[in-house]
Structure formats: C-alpha cells, structure tokens
Image (cartoon, helix red, strand yellow):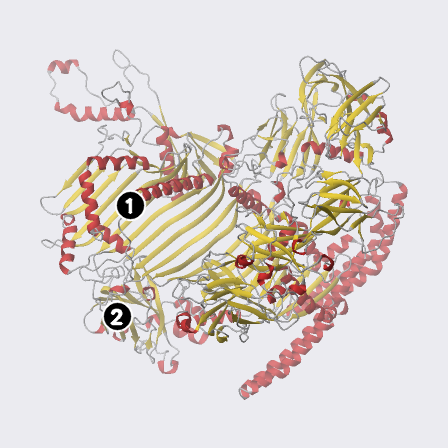
Amino acid sequence: MDPGKTLPEALDYSVFWLQTAAGDADLKAGIPPPLLSLQIKDFLNGPAEVYLDLSRPWKVNLSLVKLDQVTNFVKKILPRYQHDIASKTAVSPKRVDNKEEMFTSTFGLRNEPKSLGERTFGQGSSWKAVSFFQKFSIHTVQIVVVMETLPHPSRPGLLASLSSLKGVLNIKADPKPTGTITGATFTLQLKDLLIKTCLNDRNKALIGPFCCSVQLEAKWCMHSGSPDPFHSVPKVLADMKAGLIQIFWGQEHLNCLNMLHDLLHGYLRQEAKSQTSDHTRQPSFSVGRQQTSKTEQSSDDLRTGQFQYIQDADAQKLPNVFEVVFYNETDEHPGMMMWRYAEPRALTLVRINPVPFNTTDDPDISTADLGDVLQVPCSLEYWDELQKVFVDYRQFSLSESKACELQLPNITLANDQKELVASDLWRIVLNSNQEATEEQSSDGESGSQSLCDQLVSPMALAACTRVDSCFAPWFVSSLGVSLQLVQIELHLCHHLDQLGTAQASCLQAFTPDGKLPSEQEYMVISLKSPNVYLRQWSDGPVCQELQFSTIAECSVLEYRNLTMLSILKPLILHGQVAISNSSAEQLIDGNVFVDPIFINVGQHVIHSLDTAIRAWKQNQYPESEELVFSHFVICNDTQETLRFGQVDTDENVLLSSQHSHQYSWRSHKSHQLLHICIEGWGIWRWSEPFTVDNIGTFVRSIQYKGRTASLIIKVLPLNSVQKQIIICGRQAICSYLNQDIELKVVQCCSGQDGQVSIKEHFSTLPPNQKIPSFVLENTEFTQLYIKVKGDDVGWSADVCPESLQSEDSTVIQVPDSDGSVLHVWCSLLKLDADSPVQQRMVVFSPLFVMRSHLPDAIILHVERRSLGLKDPQLIKGKGQDESLLNVAPELVHHLTFQAREEDEASQCAVPISTALIKQIAQGPQRERSASKLLAEFYKVDTDARLAWPYITKETDSKHSSEALAQWDSPMQVKLSAWKPCLNTLLVELLPWALFINQSKWDLWLFEGEKIVVQVPAGKIIVPPNFKDPFQIGIYWASTNTVHKSTAIRLVHDITSPKWQDYPSSAIITLDEEGVTDTDVKLGAFPDHQKLCQFCISSVVRHGIQILVVEDKTVIINNTRHKIYYRPMVIFPEQATLREGDYMLESAVFHLAPARAESLGVPSSIPCWDFVAGGSLSELNDPLPQKHLLLGYCSHIGASSCHNWSLPALIRHDFPRQSVAVPLGDSSENGFCSRAVVMTYQEYLGVTYVTLSEDCSPRMIIHNRCPVSIMMKENIKDTPKCTVYCRKIPSEASIHHELYHHVWSFPDCKNEDNLPGVHLRAIPRSDLPEEWSDCIDLKSPGTQVIFLPSYGYVYVDIIHQSSTITMTLAPEGRAGPVLTSLYGMPQQAIAVRVLIAQASLTVNDDITNQCKSTELLRITLDNVLLNLAPLVNHYRPAVHEFRAEPSHCFSEIYLLELCIGDLQVDNQLYHRTSFHFPALLCQELKPESPQWKTGFSPALSAKDLDGYKHKCFLKAHVLLREQDFVFAVNEVNFELKPARLYVEDTFVYYIKTLFNTYIPDIGLYRKQARTLAISTAVPRVPGHVLNATYALVNPVKMQRLTIQAVSLLVSVHASIKLYIASDHAPLSFSLFERGPIYTTPRQLIHALAMHYAAGALFRAGWVVGSLEILGSPANLVRSIGNGIADFFRLPYEGLTRGPGAFVSGVSRGTTSFVKHISKGTLTSITNLATSLARNMDRLSLDEEHYMRQEEWRRQLPDSLGEGLRQGLSRLGISLLGAIAGIVDQPMQNFQKTSEVSAGRKAKDVISGVGKGIVGVLTKPIGGAAELVSQTGYGILHGAGLSQLPKQRFHPTEQQNDQAPNSHVKYVWKMLHSLGRPEVFMALEVVIVSNSGQEYQGCLLLTSEVLFVVSVSEDTQQQAFPVTEIECSLHPKKENCLHIVLKQQRVSYDSEGDGIRERLSEQQYERLVDYVTRTSHYIMPSSAAMLQAPLVIIADPPAVRTKTYQYLVDQHCGSVFVSKFAMVKNKALRKGFH
C-alpha cells in the first residue's frame, strides 16, 4: 500500500482468498440468490432440522503461504489460548475427541479401556448436543478450490470444482430422556466433480467431471472394533456409487504432482525442524482379543421356539428379527427358507436329517427302487450387507435315507476373521442348480431329477434342519466400504511441450513445422463395472478383506490412420485379497481369476508402444531429440511453398521450404493417395495422385499457364514402419566451398501467349551445404551467376547449364573482396538420366584440397613458377581437409613443405595442375556415386570415417585388405580424386607411420644403441624409418639409466629386403596387422625392482602404419568407493611366505569412484613391484605371477596388514574373483570387509581388470569368538595357484571366496565338490601351528570342532542360494546363537492367479496396408500362476540377540506356473500353401478342468493337485525374497509329450518379417561426430563391457532341472526338393545342474550340447521317418504299440476280475488292429504324397504345381470323397500332360513378345522341353495323388488323422472399420480452428428426421459443437454452444437432445417511441404480473373511457429445432456435464 494513504482501497487487496460470483436469479421473481441461508425447523417441539443453503458460486484460493499467515495471525491475537492448548496437550496426550476416536478405531488403532463412569460420561457428553437434532442438510452450487503450495516459477497447483453439492445427515436417537444415538446416516451427492492440475498457468483435466453419491451409515452395536456393550465406537458402512469416471494422465500431470510433492515435503521438513516436539512416541503393544467379550453359543435355533414361522409369504417380503419365512416355488424363484437373527451370527453346525419326499402324488416314482439316486440339490446362502445380494456359502444335497452335515469352519481354530461368515440373514434355497444338474444328469436320472421341485416343501425342510449359531464381536467387521462404479476410463496422453525439442538426427536437413497437436491421447484403458468391497476387523490384529471385479479392455492409437486399435479385448477380472496385520507379521493372500485374455500385437502397435516408452523417458529432458510419431514425414526440399493433402478429402497442409511435416492420413475410409500443388499457382492446381507406401522415386507434374513444374518425390524408409517423403525439384545446387556464396539463377519461361519472361532467383549457399532445389525444368534453367558474399564484390561470368555435359566441368572465376580471383569448379551431375525422374545437381568445389596426416601443422608453399609467385599456407594436419588458396586452373603449381618457420622447405617439389584429374581413373558406377554425393548433404548416408589418428579397438573387415603405402621412405605425397564425380584434386601428405604413446610413461625409442627419439606420454609422432629392430626405453631416476625392452622387428610383405637373422629369443616380430607384448625391467636393487608391461599394436589405415604403445593392463573401478591398489609380481616359490612378508614398501595407486548411473573411468597400471627376493635374472624361469592387493587406505608397511586384501591373481583362466577388501578400523553393517568382484578380460593384447561391487558374495564368515582365527582350504587336488590362508578377526564378520570357487568358474557341472576347511586360533609366537579337523561345508547344520590352543567351537553352516554362511561361536555362547534362530518373516505374500484362456495374436500390418492379417496365435488354456511362501525348505539365517551383520531375513517362495494346454497356430494356413495348421501342440490331450466364470477363488488343494497332474507344462521356481527383491533359487521345468511341426517356407517367411517387429533404436541415435581421440584415457571396447557385465552378474541358481522331454517332430523342406519327415520321435534325457554359478553363455552352451547330443542319438529315427522312404519308423512304432496293447490290456484286466479280463481282451484286440491299420495306411499315404509333390516339382510347370498344392490342402473327410478327389486330379494331370506339349511353348512365346527372334526361338524350344517332361511326370504325380487322397480319406473317415486343428479361425481386421481417435478429431478435422481444445468426443447414433440411424460423433469445443459422420469421416453440422441446449431425455436415458434456439428480433414501435427490448424471461414475468394484478384495480369511469382493455400479447417468437442422438447413458451424462461447463464459460457464468 502507498505509504501516503491513510485508508486502504479495494485495489490494494490483490490477493484473493475467497471469491463469489453472481448466482442464477429466480426464474419468476428475478431476484438474485443470497450468499447463505440458514433454516432451523422444529427446534422447540422436538429434534430439530437444520438446512444450510449456499446459493452463489464460491472460489477458495489456498496455499501454504496463506496457511502460515493464518497461523501467525491466530498466534498473535490468541497467545494465551495457544498456550492453554499446548499445556493441555502436554498433560494429557491421550485424550481425544470421541469423533476422532471413531475414525481412529475404524482404522485399527486401539485405545486404553476406560472405566464405566468415563464411558458413560464420554458417550453422553459427546453426542448429547447432537441428539437434539434430527437432520442436517446442506446444499451448494458451484464450488471451486485452488490449492497451491509455495511460490514457484512454474506455479504448480491443483484445482477442484463441482457444480452442486447436497449433503444430508440423519440421526436416529432413543427417545428422551436417555438421548442415546443408535445410528446415523450421512448422504452426500456431488455433481460434476472435476480435478485439474495447474502448471505454468495452464490447466489440464486430471479426473472428471463425474457425479457420485456417498452414503455413510454408522451403527452403535457390538463389533470387532467395539466389543464392549456400551457401543462407544460405531460400526461404519460406506457406500459410494458413481458413473463414468475419466482419468487423464500425461507428462504434465506427473510433473505437476511431483513438483507439488517436493514442495510439500520440503515445507513439512522445514516445519519439523522449526518445531521441537517434547513427546516421545510410546511403543505400540498389540492387544489380543478381548477376553471380556465371551462367545454366545446357541443350538438348534429354528426348532426351539424362538423363531416365528411365516408361510406363503410374498416374494418381496424379508423376515424380521427371529422370523422364519417360507417361500414356495414359482416360475420366478425357487422354493426357499429364510430366517433372520438379531445380530450377525456365524453358523457352527448345519445338519439336515433325512427329509421325507412328497412322492405320493406320482405313482411312477418309488423311493424304494430309487434308493439314494434321488437327491435334491440345495444351497446355503447369506446376505452380504455390502453387496446387497445373497452369496452362496455351501452346496449340499437332500436325501431320504442319509443325513447331511455341512463342513463349516471351526470358530475356535479360525485364525482370521475372513474365514468366518457372520450375517443376520440366512436362507436355504431348494434345487438351486437345477439347470446344471439336468444338463449333466444321465438318462436314467433325468426323469427323477426333473421332479425335484415337487419333492420337498420348505416347511418339511425346517422340521429336519438343525442350525447352531454363534455370536462374538471379534468376527463382526467394524468397517465396510462398497465402491460401485459404472466405468473408469484411463486416458494416457503425451504432452509434447514436456518432451525433447532438439531436431531429430534422421531429419537434420529439415526443420519441423510444429503442427503436431501438443496433447496426444495414445491409449485408453477401460474398466467397466468396477466393484470393490472392503471389510475390516479391528480386533487386535487388523484384518482386511478386499473383493474386486471388473471388465477390462485396452486400445492404443495407431499413427498411420489416427485410429484406435484394440490390443486387449474385454476380459473378466475378479478376485479377493486378504491382509492380516499383527505385531509379528503381515500376511497378504490374494486370488485373482481372469477369463479370457486376448492380446493382439502388430507392427503398428509395437511402434506406438515403443514411441510411448521413449516419450516417457524423455520427460523433462528438452535437450533430447524430437520424437517422430507419425508413419510419414513429408519434407519440402524446394524453394517453393507446397500444399498437399489426401485425395477425396478436404485436407490441405501448407509446408514451407526446408521444413518437414509429420503426416498421418486424413481419412481411413477414402483412397490413401496424396496430391500436391505449389502455393501461388492458381487456385490449388493439384497434381496427379500418388501413393507413398512403396519405396522409390517418381515424378509428378503440374500445369499452369503454359508452364510445367516437375516435382520429384523420393520415398525413403526410416524403419520398417515409418517413411520419409522428400519432395524436390529438378535443379539441386550444392557447395563444397569453405565460405558463403550468393547465387543468381536466371529462369527463362514462355507463357500461353508465347511471350518469354525472365525471372531471377537469388539465394545464399552456405559452406559445405545445399540449398533447397529449384522447381525448374532443364530448358528453363538458362543461366547461373555466383559471387562471394558481400556488397562490394561483383558477379562471376554466367554459367549455362545446358553447355555443361554430364561428364564435364568448368572453372568459374569469382571476384573476391580483396581484389583477387577465386577459381571454383562447377560440375553438373545428372541423377537417373535415362528415366523421367531425372535430376540435375550443380556442385561447386575447390580446385585442390590438401589433407595432411601429420600430427603437427606444416607450412605449404604453393609456387606458380610461370608467374613467379609463391604463396605460403598453413596446413593444420591431423587428417583435416583444407582448400588451397591462390591457385588457378591450367597452371602447374609446385608444392613444397616446411615443418617449422625456422626449418628449411623440402627440396623436392610436387607439381600439380587441374589437368591431372583426367589421368585419375573414375569409378565405373558414376550414377551411384552421384546419388551418394547427394545423400551426404541430406546427412542420411554420411561416411563415418575413422578420426585421426585412426585408432580403433573394434575389428573392421573393410580395412583388413588395406596395404601399407610405403615403409622405406619417411613421407609420401598422394594425388587422387577428392570426391567421386568431381574434378577436385586431393593432395595427401602421408607419413610412413604414426607412433602413438598411450601409456603413462615417457618413452625413448632406440634403434640398436642409438637413441632415435623421445615420445612423451600421450603424444603422437612420426617415427623415422626403422632399418633395424627398435627398442622401447624408460628413464628410471633411481638408477639414472634408461632401461630397454626386448628388440622389436617390424615385418612387412614379401617385397621387403632380406632382414638379417637374429636369435628368436632376442627379437619380437610385429606384423603390419598384429599385436605383441614387451616388458621393461626397472631398478637394479632387489628391493626396488619394477616391471613395466606394454602392448604394441600395429594396423594399417590410409596406407599409414599406426603403431600404438599402451600399458598392458587397464583397471576400471565401477564401485562407489575410492579404492587403492598395489600391483605386485610374486614368484611361485615365494608364495608360501607369510602374509606380512608382502607388506613391503611398494607403489600405491588409487582409483576414483564411479559416478552414479555411469561406468568408471579406465586407468592403466603403470608398473608392477617385485616381491623381495626375486631377481631380474629369474624373471623367465620360473614364471612369476601378477597379483593385486586392494584396500581402502594407502598405508603400507608391516603393521598395515589388516588394511589390504589377500593377493588376487591376475590370470586369464581366473575370469572372476570375489575379493574381500578390508575396511581397516571401520565397519559397515557389522562387516569389517567389503566384497568386490574383480574380472579379467583380454582383448587385442590388452588386459582389462574391472572392480565392481559384489551383491551376492560366495561366502560370509561370522566369528563370534574372542580370538582371531586363521582358515585354510583342504584342497585334495593339485592347486592351480598359491592358496593363501584367510584371517578372521575376532568378533567380526568378513566376506570370503573359496579358491575352489575361483578355479571352477564358470564351469557348469552337476555337482559341486566343495572342499573342507581347517581352522586354527592365532596363537602366541611361542606356540606351534596346529590346525583343527576338517569342516564339511557341503552339509548345512551345526558342527563342533576342537580348536587347538583355544577350545571347542560351534560351527553353523547355512546355504542360501549361492552364498555359504559360516558362523563360529565359542562353547559358552553357543546357546543364544543356536536357539534363537527360527523367527517368522515380517511379511508373507500368497497370490494365486487363474486364467481360463490366454491368447496372443501376432498380426502383420505392413504387407497389406488396407487390412491386418493374423500371422501367429499362441493359445494357453487353464493357466495357474501360484506364488506362496515355502515352509521349512531351508533353515533361516542365524540371528543372535544383537544385530547380526548378515543380510536381512529372506523368505523362500514357490512360484508355480501350470498350463493345461498350449498350442501355437499358423494363422496363414488357409491363405497360402503351407502344410501345417499348427506349429506346437500337445500329443495327447486329456480332459482338462474347465473353470467356471463365477468360481470360488478359494479352490481346494485337492482340486489344484488334480489339475496340476493333468497340466501340459509345469514350471516350479523357488524364489528368495529379500527387501522386496526376488532372486531365482531353483527351477524345475516339465513338459508332457508334444508335437512340433516345422516348415521351411513358413520359417523363411517369418524371418523376413521378424525385423519389422523390432523397434529401430538407431532412428533416434544422434550421429556421432568423429572427434580426435584422446590418448590420455584408454577406451574400453564394447565387447569387454558386455563380457564384464556377464561376469559381474552371473546366473545364480541352486538347481536347474529340466525333466525328460519327448517330441514328435515333423519337418517339411520344400524349397528345392520336397523332403518330409513325419512324426519322428525325439526324446531328451533329464537335464540337471546344480549349484549353478556361471555366465549365461556357459549355461546356454551346456544346454545346447545336452540337447544336440540327444538329437544325434535319435538321428536314425529321423531318417526312418522320411516320407520318401514310406516312414518305416512310424510303421514299426505303430505295430509295436498295437502288440503292446494286445498283451498289456488283458493282463491288467486279469488282476481285477473275469469281466475286466474279457473287456481287456476286446480292447487289446481293437487297439492291435487299429494301430496296424493306421501305421500301414499312414506309411502308404505319406509315400504317395511325397512322390506326388516331387513329381509336380519336376514337371517344371509352376501353374500346375500351385494348382495341385492348393487342391492338396483340401483334405477329404471320407473314403468316397478321397476317391472322388483322387480320380479328378488324376484326370486333370493326364489332360495337363497332353496339353502341356502345346501350352508350354505358347506361354513362353507370349511372355517374350518384345525380345529378339533368337530369344523367342530359345524360349519356344524351352517350352517344348517342359511339355515333354510334363508328359512323364504329371501322370505319375496324378496316380500317386490318387493313392494319397484315398489314404487320407480312409484315415479321416476312421478318425485316425494326426494333424491338429487350429484353435481359432483367422480373422482380418479391415483398417477402414477402425474407430477414430481423439487425436484425429483435434488434428485432422478441426485444423481450421487453429489448435482447438476438444473437451470430449462422444460416439453417437444420429437419428435423422426420417428416422434413419447412422454412426456419428459429437465434438465439443470451447465455442462450437460439431457433428461428424463416422461413415463419411467429415463434418456435417456445427452449433454455437451459446445458442443450444443439451440434455438427456428424462424417460429415454440413452437419448440425447440438442435444441437449437434462435430468437426472432422484433423492431415494432410501441407508443410514441421504440420500447426497450425485453428478454424472454422479462417479458414472461411482465405478462404474469399484469395478469395477476389487473383485477385488483378498480378503474374509474374516466379511466375506462380512456384506457383500452389489457390484452395479453404473444411472447417474442423463438425458432427451435431439436436434434436427436442415441448415446451411451453414462457417457451422455458426462457429455452434458462438460457441455454445461463450456456453455457457462462462454456465457461467463460462475468460475472457470
């Protein structure tokens, strides 16, 4: 406020806290409503009623800043009050208000019991005032709440609004004077509830709008939350019902909520710091069940006289308390008996004695004859107060002879309340499953069971039924929540402003036009009828039960047509979850049933999902590349502005020059063709339509005023789904110059009248780029001028493109700004010269380009001797291209080189001139080279040339054949063509070699005894030519000498001269492409000797020999800690020394920790220290071993042994080691070490050692003894390396890995022979070393050993997955260690998922763009997924009373996957000539259990075991859960006999489509620019990284078991010759390995070898199953099975009796005949089929072969049909053989009509030969086909066919039938409105005036309501929202009415002047007022004479028209709500 003001004004209050707006005035009175009205009724006579009405819209603005202001204000004005509250809170922290106590107890928190007086007083005082009121009612209109947190630049917030609220609270109280409340009901109705997120002043809907009603019912009764009889806490039932709820979720929603969460979390954390709490949290003790609440038992409730019987009651009548109502059977409902208790009771016993049946009326029924056959099915049901339905509890049957007793849960043994059912209303329904019984009954029982409804009367049932019940408060739920919704729709969206904005690398040459919708809805997940029921019992341990059910489906956006594809068809999902919480554990038990699951996947779906995943990864990373969503990207590479669109639609898209547009089709119901026009050429002169689905290049022409414009359209693939369409002109201009030039293009065109007009086009050509092409014909492009960019320079001479030939170029002289002349090559290249898509490319390039491969810059002197000029120029080197300056054409230039200014130039001059380019041979593929040249400018096919100095760690085959340019001369100048098709001459300066020092040492090069040169670390030099072997030397300061390596000789090709012979031991040879190692020994004293190892590699690149010297060993630290390491070389004979002997003064190096989510920085090991005692002379014999010592501190010396690990050996056969690195004096989680994995990889001569954190160490040792202990392994075999003893500190825990584990990795063997270990206490120095007995590590359990010099020690061994835990405890402490071991887990999860059927369909979307065809279908039946904790599988981990430093408790879970049936179908079987309809199926299909949809989730264990026994596939996986992370422990896989069908043609077809289903990751990868490689940091190859990851994360399993597998394999190969093997038996033996600790590669290798060996052993059966041989193996197998059954079945029957024996003989004989006949027929049929197919192929008649294959797939069903088909095909084959002699030559003659006569004669002769061959082969094939068809007919007719059938017939999804998406309406249909916001798109059925109905859609925008026809895909109508009314029909709720009101304006004058125009409401009010008040006025006679009679005038005429639409009721209500909001916003009513 202005300090000069004394009073504030209204403008000074700029922050709004509470706002109101004008409400709707009264319709009749016109009075504005009040803000608030309060009404109280009957407050004097009885319980009062309170009504509160808020009649104006409210808007509340909340924030944390305002909350702080309110708090500070209250503290200032009420300081004493705050102090009193704080003191009271401190004195009695447990006192809470009873209202809070109600909700607290509801959620399971217990309070201390109060005394009787306290309770009575608390109950009365809390609710005494409330009992005086009977009803509270509140009604509001619009309420808007804006919630913000703290000030932030993005201003995140939430906005909640609703249009009206109605709340009613009804209170039921006892009559006075007690005033006790017995119940309360609160009803809340919310209308149009809407929640939005606010970010950057943008609001986006999050939830809603939707309408809901909430009803809370509180009953003061005894229940689990309030077991006392005073009912202090009520039982609460909540019921919520809502319609359609739409939830929108995108990147902006997530970012806003994350921002709010962070701000709120920071605020609360700051508040927590500012406030000091004096209260300490009291420990919560679990209170058990109240012992005071005794169980009330009652027996024989219905027959003891307590209940009153009521007969013949109305069906709608329910019994009252203690009433039994009997309902006789009617057509609507069965007979039943229903009774009600006073409170919810659980039934403990239900026994029905034999019931007398009423059979006297029917003489045909005799119970004596029927016996126990006659039974009446019944069901016991209870009333569920949440679901408001009767729920089936038990099924049973009544009988006349047997009593029936139901199995009910025992109350005393029940652990959870969910096992008991307590209800006050029960009933027994007679004949409940009559329909199911009749369907399943046999013929003999159907007659009796059909009369069950007449047999038993409900009254007779009551007389024979005993019901015992029980009541206890603890099994009555205290809370019940019911949630019933109509539908939930989750809309997943992309918000492009939150994603990456960088230009896509694949479209770098073009700028996006930004016309994509900023919000894209890409997926809709719909949950129909979701119902959730929650019950909670609050007695002691809180138990919750959740039941849910819904129907789910999902659809995804397809970006080609912007339609929605269904990927998940509607499935039924229901189940229950029970959660039990107690102080000891939490149990979660769930059952889920799904039926069925149908998933459709195709290329379009995969593209949409992959794009969605990339979009979410890009969230809040604006530097990421912009995603390419659509399937087409149209790029304008012309100078013109283009306009294009889909033909036959209203689409037209404007695309500027050098811009790209992501395009999707406007309509999927029209022809998907594009047409294009040039903006400014008349009124949209469209070109001919063209398709963009086929890759290629074509041209379209546009005619206008005599001119022709040709647009060349190039369709290029981006990936398998997306394509790039580049539109360019005929004239492309490119520049390879290094400066900007300006162009002037002269166009000469003639009009329709013959006049010639000349136009000039100006443009700027940037360096090394191209400009958009010119849309000019070759005849119009007449002249071209260029000049250097600037104002004071002139143009060059004109260049006429027509004068330039395609093979010629010209030199243009361009004036420069300094007065000189720049000479430039101008080349004209033609692309596709002989085709209509011819394109010309004008390229400007320099005359000469210099490329120096030297490491330093040089000075180049260009001497023009004829002119006497010499110009120096600095050439940078390092492989960079630079244009030569001051050069001229046709002159000879002499080049001389000068290294430095102080040096002299070279004596030898190199002459160059422009004429030399003609002597250089051009490539033969000039056309292809020109296209590649143009592609470089589009940056699509860039030459990823290796950067200087050409070092690579990847093997590249294309450089392998590169030869060394020279080796005996230091330098070479090479002249070549710079680019293909250009005349630019490239001058290359090539050294003979580059010597690169990548080590950490400064190296000296020696040749003999002569020092050649010094190479500092990280430097690159050009070495002199080595004539003799060279050596590498290192200067060592301690000895002041340079120590040399072994001599290295470079070996070249055979043209090199004879090198002198050297001893092989003294010389190391190095090839041009090779790697070698060399060592340098440093130091002369034994204690200070070091070894430096180098790797020298040689490659040839660009004719240069690249010599790289790098350190032999590279070490990488991938851990998050800094690690010190000490490299050492230890001799084997010294390895037996003690540990302290290695703590010499040696070099210590450190490794920096790796950054988060990144790999460590590689570092090379410079040198290795020799251990004392080793001499340099002993370096080679014996061979020393390299070791590493790791630690976390750099201290060295004899006293720092505990700071370093044991020596870790660096060897190639030890790829992985787990090293325990000591932590020194500190500890971490109780451990004094940290496990680190050290891996070894060697690649191209360099050793890579990686250090990573070990998440699962092999061994953990806990030493609880007070003395330190040494441990050594008892290795029986010869050790592969030195074995060190492990020191275990006292009272500590360490990690360890046995040397046996190191040696055996990565072997995958069946058994792991763990060695034993010996222990000894570390004694004093005067005591001898004595070891204990061997400890067996293979046996888990406790062992007692004697430790010399200490005593007995208890050793406890536990195997957990791949970790061995060994605990050492002294004898005195063994008790607490070994007795407190077995604790219960903190959390246990049991989940069972039952899937009746699951099917995955793989569709092909790209082969045919008009439809999607099914390719493969995988069908699973009766899938069981069971996850349950495994009891007593392994012994749990050791736990002492103090914290154990081992891992947390890990629970073992058993995951079972059982599949009843599995089949993989070939869905193309009916469309093409494939042989097999299925690829994989079960051999024998036994009857599998079929689950009903309404199953009980609690299936019995017996049913599940029976189901598992019948399953086709079973997988048992033991999982170890720790910290919610599951690790695989054991795997057991079992597969029943199966059939496998393999067909080569189908495999090849799938192979061609396989890559189209894999997302293209290279599309968004930024193109790596070739940068100079830093030689300071070594690079790690990708091969090493992948191998290291596999070593660090090995496959860890206790056991892998794959049971024996039997397969019948059928293989058909028909590419060249038809070879088939049918039902060849393959059997594979058991595969079992364990424990497994290996790499995935090794495990796969073991599996492959096992099954390859099994297949080889059965190769004879495969050969014997060949059809061409008649399948003798199958015949033998069939005869063997028949003979086996012939003897086996009678023998089995003989053991069971004579009758079974006779039956066995009959069945054995039948099986014998069946198998023999089936085998014989199958063998003959297969032989005939194979012969027929091969004859058809040999006929050389493709048409005949295809016709026969098509007919052959129509298999006959009977013998008659087989004979008919076989005879007809034999006849056709005979006719074809005769006709082929004439037909084949004629066909060949007609095919070759446009070739030469000689070729025609040759083809005719070939046709004659084919005809003659057909005469021989076709009759043989036809005869064989007759036999084949007859055999198939017999086999099919007798039911002996073996081919499986498809489970589902393939269907085609037509693209034009797909529904439109929300994105299409926004992007394509409403593009003319800019960027409209479509609030809702409602699918409707439009009803025309004539009553016709057709599909449509209503689009609601902020101003207009559009009506769209779905069939035509166009707009039909548009209504302004302010002029229409939208409502649902009150009687037909699925009918939506839109009323258009247009008021007719009247201009008639009234009286002397024009009256003010009144609105319709004002006019009606005026008329009503005059009519009502006129008869009260007594007019005088004068007035009667003067005034005329009052006549009621008609209201102003309003024209209305009603449109009718059929909609979904719930979607329509949401649409009406959104329409009201949009209209109110347009009319500025309320808040928005």
The 10 Å Cα crowd at callout 2, few under 14, some 14 to 19, many 20 or more, is many
In depth, the one of 101 and 1049 nearer the eye is 1049
Tell me which label, 1 or 2, sits earlier in the chain: 1
Residue 782 placed where, x, y %? 75, 18
Residue 1213, quarter of the rendered image = bottom right
Q: Are marks 1 and 2 in contact (CB under 8 Å)?
A: no
SS under mark 1: loop
Residue 144 placed where, x, y %? 32, 36
Considering every residue shown, the one lying at the far top of the view is: 1952
Q: Is residue 1108 visible?
A: yes
SS under mark 2: strand
Residue 223, quarter of the rendered image = bottom left
Mark-to-mark CA distance, 1 and 2? 55 Å
In depth, the one of 922 and 1414 nearer the eye is 922
Residue 1120 placed where, x, y %? 52, 50
The 10 Å Cα crowd at callout 1, few under 14, some 14 to 19, many 20 or more, is few
Please state if 1760 lies on the left or on the right of 1351 as rendered. right
Please state if 1851 lies on the left or on the right of 333 as rendered. right
Identify the disc placed on residue 443. none
Q: Residue at x 84, y 38 (%)?
A: 969
Quarter of the picture containing the C terminus is top left
Residue 1692 placed where, x, y %? 57, 84
Residue 1389, quarter of the rendered image = bottom left
Q: Which residue is mark 2?
A: 469
Q: Which amino acid, mark 1?
A: Thr
Q: Which residue is mark 1?
A: 276
Looking at the rendered image, the disc whose residue lies closer to the viewer, 1 or 2, is: 1
Quarter of the picture containing the N terminus is top left
Please state if 1763 lies on the left or on the right of 1937 as rendered. right
Q: Which amino acid, mark 2?
A: Ser
Work out whether 1782 lies above or below 273.
Answer: below
